[in-house]
Each structure stands twice: as C-alpha cells, then as structure tokens.
Amino acid sequence: MGKAVAAVFTTHVPWLMSADPVAHRAYLGRHATTFYDAMLKLERERLRHLEFDTFLLIDTHWLSTLEYVLNAHERLSGVFTSEELPALQHDLEYDYRGDPELARGVEIEARARGIRAIASAHRNLPVQYPTLNVMHYFNHEARHRVLPVSVCQTASVKNDLAYGAAIGQAIWKSNRRVVIVASGGMSHKFWDYDRILDRASASPDDIASTANRLYDERIMEWFKAGRHDAVLAAADDYRAHCSPEGRFSHYITMAGAMGGDGWTWRGEQFGKYEAALGTGQAIFFFQPAISGAERAAA
C-alpha cells in the first residue's frame, strides 16, 4: 500500500538558479528574495530525513489540452535552456530516475474513472523548469524518483479535483511513498514591458495589483489553517479574478489527491510571500500534525 507522506506548494522562479549575488541585486534591487534560504531550509529540515520514493510534481509550465499527461520515462536526463529567459537559465544538466510504474498506475486509475489521461514515454518529451528548478533544491542528490505531471488548460476545478483523486488512489494502490509537489505561483499578472524591470523586486509592494495581493493573502491564511475546503470553494472565483498560474490547477490537483475538501493538513510557510515581476509567490509545506511523543521518538 502506497502513501502520500507530504505535500508542497512552491514557487519555481527562474532566479533561484542564479548563484551570482551581483546578478541577484541587479535583478531584484534592494528587496532581495528569501526563497534561496527557504528552499534549502525546507529540504534540510522537512524532506531530507523523510522516507519516500518519488516526487510527483504538478508542473504549471507543462500545459496539455486534450488530456492530463504524465511523463512515463524511466530516466529524465538532458541539458535545459529556458526559451522564456535563456540569459537567466541555460545549460542546466539534469539526470533523475523517473517513475513509469506510478505514471501508468495513475493513467489506469484515471481512465477507470472516465478521466482522459496518458502516461507518455514519447521520445524527447520535454521537462520544464518548474520541475527542474524545484528538483535542483529538493532532490539535488537525485535520491528520489521524479514524476512530472501536466496541468490541463481546458479542465474545470471539478475535473482537476477528480484527476487529483485518481492520483491519490493510484498512489494508495502502489508501493510508493510519495511527496506531491504543486510547482507554481499564486496570482499571475505580470507588469507590462515598460515597467517590468522597475518593478522586479521581491517586495509584495511590487505585486501587480492590490486586489491580487489581498486574495493571495486570504488563500495563504487558509493554507496555514488547513482550510483546504475554503480554498477549493473559492477556486473558481480566484481563477476568474486573479489569473493564478496554471489556473491554480497545480494546487487543486494536489488537494484532490489529498482528499479534496476533507484535507485538513496545516501549511507551514517557508520564506515570505513575495513578488516576481508582478506575480505572487510563496512556499508551503503540508504534513500531518506530529504528536509530542512521535517527535521525541524521531
């Protein structure tokens, strides 16, 4: 019997891959990001000693249209250059074990429920930077398998929840211990071309609209309280008013896999809420509450 042992909602902003502090200052100005330290701390304090096999990562830059797609390659390897920001992210070598067995298990479970899904091992199926950037921090020794999953850009909230439930059931039927990662941002409105560089700092003052910032803050309070029912009840409205990254499908699918509106794990925030060129970004770790006795035994 498999199990989802933890869940993560995380940014994947490209500047995470820049190790040059001078470049950081040039790009971000005086309001530098907290995410470098936050990603390292989350891996060190929450993931490193957690026993699990696979990262199942819902990638908001992998947009499918007709169906949900899972990467079913035995190995994910190559050299990545971002077509969006090649000067900032280029020549990234990567090599991870995939999880075709779990990919096929999700495909079977989804299809049994009438959900269109495909486990794809087609040659040259690309891996996007929301997967690679996060794995660079969370799986830097490549100890765990990696299963990238698309978001379907034509799917409703109801569709995403149903697909997430299929993922959760497929994990339960497997022999895998899994960490589910929703890789993407919150509100996702960029500044326009003429202002974007002047508003490139990590300060929340540089979120593209006050309304987006306030809605993001409301969502984060629900994360902290374990009120996933409230987040899901607001998901359609959030999509309509804040254009969240990936239509918020990364979170919705993850929540579906964790039990939908019955999921109550509280979110622990790592780093601060930040802007990225106008968009809202945050990092949250979700795990069942640990009793004092369990903590002492660990």
Image: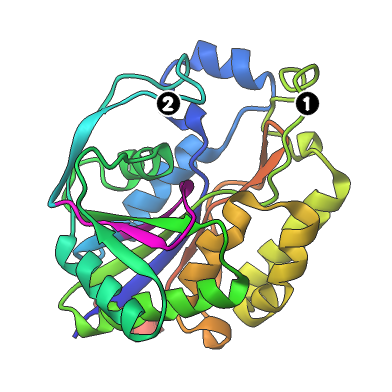
Count of marks overlaid on the render: 2
Q: Give the range drawn in magenta.
A: 56-73
> Is residue 58 magenta-colored?
yes
Residue 143 pos. (x, y %)? 16, 50
Relative side of 211 to 182, left or right: right
Q: What element carries label 1?
A: loop
Of callouts 1 and 2, the N-terminal one: 2
Specify whether residue 226 is in view.
no
Residue 164 lies in the magenta stretch: no
Q: In the rendered view, does 48 fall on the left or right side of 157?
A: left
Residue annotated with mark 1: 192
Q: Do the residues labelled 1 and 2 touch (CB within 8 Å)?
A: no
Indicate the quadrant containing the N terminus: top left, top right, bottom left or bottom right. Answer: bottom left
Residue 161 is situated, as x and y percent measured from the top left of the image, at 52, 77
Asked whether 287 or 17 is in front, the reply is: 17
Please name the residue that numbered disc 2 is placed on: 82
Helix, strand or loop status at disc 2? loop
Furthest residue toward front: 66
Residue 144 sits in quarter: bottom left
Residue 73 lies, in percent from the top left, at 17, 51
Quarter containing the C terminus: bottom left
> Foreground: 54 or 264?
54
**Quadrant hosting residue 179:** bottom left
Q: Distance between the residues labelled 1 and 2?
A: 20 Å
Q: Which amino acid does label 2 sit on?
A: Ser
